[in-house]
Amino acid sequence: MDFELSASEEAFRQEVRDFLKENLPPPRERGPNFLSEWLTKVRAKRWVGFSWPKEVGGGGGSIIEQAILKEEMALAKAPPLGMSMMGLAWVGPGIIQYGTDEQKQRFIPDILDSKVTWCTGYSEPNHGSDLAAIQTKAELTADGKHYVVNGQKIWTSLAPWADWIILLTRTQFDVDVKHKGITCLLVDMKTPGVEVRPIENMAGDRHFAEVFFTNAKVPVENRLGKEGEGWMVTVSALANERSSIGEVTQLYDKLDTLRDLVKRSKKNGQPASNDQSTRRRIAEFEAKIAAMKYNGMRYLTKQLKGEPLSSETSVNKLHRASLEIDMDDFAVALSGAAGLELAGGAEAVDKGKWAKASLGWPNVVIGGGTPNIQRNIIAERILGLPKDGSD
Amino acid sequence: MNFGFTEEQELLRDQVRKFMQGACPLSTVRKIMATDDGGSRALWQQMAELGWLGLVVPEAYGGLGLKWVDLTVVLEETGRGLSPLPLVSHTLAAVALARCGTEAQKKAWLPALASGSTTATLALYDEPNWIHPDAVTLTAKNRRLVGSKPFVADAGVADLFVIACRTEAGLSLALVPRDATGVAVALQPIMDRTKRMGTVTLDVVLAPDQFMALADDDLAYLTDCGAVAVTAELVGAAEATLAMTTAYAKQRVQFGNLIGKYQGVKHRLAEMFVDIESFKSLLYYAAWTVDDAPHELPRAASLAKAYASDAAARIGIDGVQLHGAIGFTAEYDVQLYLKRTKWARPAYGDSDHHYERVAALGGL
């Protein structure tokens, strides 16, 4: 066991730090063009799509270098490396793996340059967690030039302002296994017959939406992968997520703000920092975050040795989910009724920041597969327990 | 960067696992549990010959001079097999001697511990649920040690007691041979018969070279080492519990289905996996800090033991519960693991103690 970096890895860390020193002024010194300039600069460094091959415009970074970059960015509280969140997370990797040369040329540069926002059309009204059961239909026209799409997606995050959607459709209904007959299409949101109806969430935001498809015509060259093999495209793209090191740094940062809140708060008329159960809760959060950190390092080591990661990443997803829910909830509960006040309230704690955040967790917790799905993955794929459900 | 084990460490793991399966399977563990003193000289001697009794003892004193990460590998496997042999307490006694002893004391005792010709144990606190220098109350005046030390690990088989006490010079460790006049040992009826504990009653006059100075940070260090060692055994024990329970869920049919198909069962097993993975990772980091980053040991050890104490105790309980009535029987092995996890919970600090320490180290 050692935690040493090689000379070139250390040099890379220093390069990132030097860059941040040069190009990341404190928030109040940032001008109106800061973000666009930042995006241009990190793009020029090839740190956007850093893990992607150089041929497509990525950075070709090693696994360790990716971890270093993520950690340093998170430590510096830097803005994201690119604004096309889903494009960078799985649409781009899916296109790199399964796309044609034309698709790569057409879509990848726009993702790297933060020019397009992608959303993800997986869940349907009756098929959220059970993704493979989708019913949105895509039929090839007689001339073979288009797919005609009919159906509905729901809980589609970012849809109200997305330019493109990666869409799971069913091209075949008489299949023996529901994972077959699924086809993945890349669809321009301006296509006639695509309609977005935002849904207000419990925090009062309109981040997600229903997306309706009525005879929407999608050129056949926008099919990603082969017809009927969309499930494989999706699964391998979702598996693209790598180490959780950036997340861990953010969680440590959040824990610091929670400690700070505890130090400023009173409970039962006494400083909350003297309260035993409060102290224990903070320490329990730290233990979970530290567990994520060292789990992540063990999994990173496995990857470096060339061993395949099975489904262990579900372990950290479960920790992340519980921390996302519990840390904000703890902050709200700490202040009693005052914790309930939203922005504008005279007693609002930190301008209602915690109250608002405590209503936002489903974005993370449900979005990437619910905790129960993660438990199924661990039980079935790691422990080898029998599948439940109909298959 | 490499947060994994070397080939040599994997070979060591393999060797210990084979030893436990071949020489000390659970049928043998049960035989040792039925003895009066809780030991097996023959198996202990075999372990000594394999070098495990002096694993972290420096080579200059007859040990193998390996690190705590290596020891962790060994203890995971002895824990998996519920070894009743006193490897943890013996190793901690050796670590105490190596850290606090004078050159003469180390030369006098460590080779005998490394070879197994002397079996030793370490006894620190006089209170069963208080980890603090003030919890050491046993006192020696003019080198005469009078009183008793409760809950001494492996008291039935130890030849040498390394005992924390107070002297005119402050906190000290006394080296008390079992056969000294005025030493009496009474085993306590502890629920886990693979981890026998006893009260050592003392009225002995010791020579000056039978005392070692024990600074507060030595006491904390030895406690942290104890927490790491206990957690290492817990990883193995918890993994064994999960493996037994998972195997049972794959063959037990109720309501026409394997019970492992029901989410009430499979999700609990998945959560056990999550917890074990997590306190295992915390443990590996803590074990690494012992030798390579000792200033980080207090926080790392507390994080690992805090998480493991409660999670493993729950795994012990649910391992039995998920087996149904068969798990409740004396004949079935899963209940032995439940007892082990209960034994380990207070050892070198429970979760309340360690989480409180984490909170304080974090600035609260």
Image (cartoon, rainbow, N blue to C red):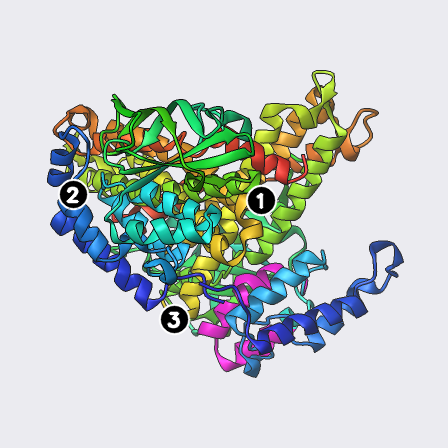
Q: Chain of mark 3?
A: A
Q: Quadrant of residue A278?
A: top right
Q: Work out whether B39 lies above or below A38.
A: above
The residue stretch that appears in magenta: A82-109
Distance from Cα at disc 2 to Cα at disc 3: 44 Å
Counting from the top left corner in percent of width and height, residue B41 is at 16, 43
Counting from the top left corner in percent of width and height, residue B346 is at 41, 29
Residue under label 1: A363
Q: Nearer the viewer, mark 1 or mark 2?
A: 2
Residues at discs 1 and 2 both on one chain:
no
Q: Nearer the viewer, mark 3 or mark 1?
A: 3
Q: Work out whether A211 lies above or below A31.
A: above
Residue under label 3: A306
Residues at discs 2 and 3 both on one chain:
no
Q: Chain of mark 1?
A: A
Name the N-terminal-most of marks 3 and 1. Answer: 3
Instruction: Give me the residue at 37% from left, 43% from top.
Output: B93
Distance from Cα at disc 1 to Cα at disc 2: 60 Å
Type of amino acid under label 1: Asn
Counting from the top left corner in percent of width and height, residue A373 is at 40, 44
Q: Nearer the viewer, mark 2 or mark 3?
A: 2
Magenta region, main secondary structure: helix
Residue under label 2: B41
Type of amino acid under label 2: Arg
Distance from Cα at disc 3 to Cα at disc 1: 32 Å
Q: Secondary structure at mark 3?
A: loop
Q: Secondary structure at mark 1?
A: helix
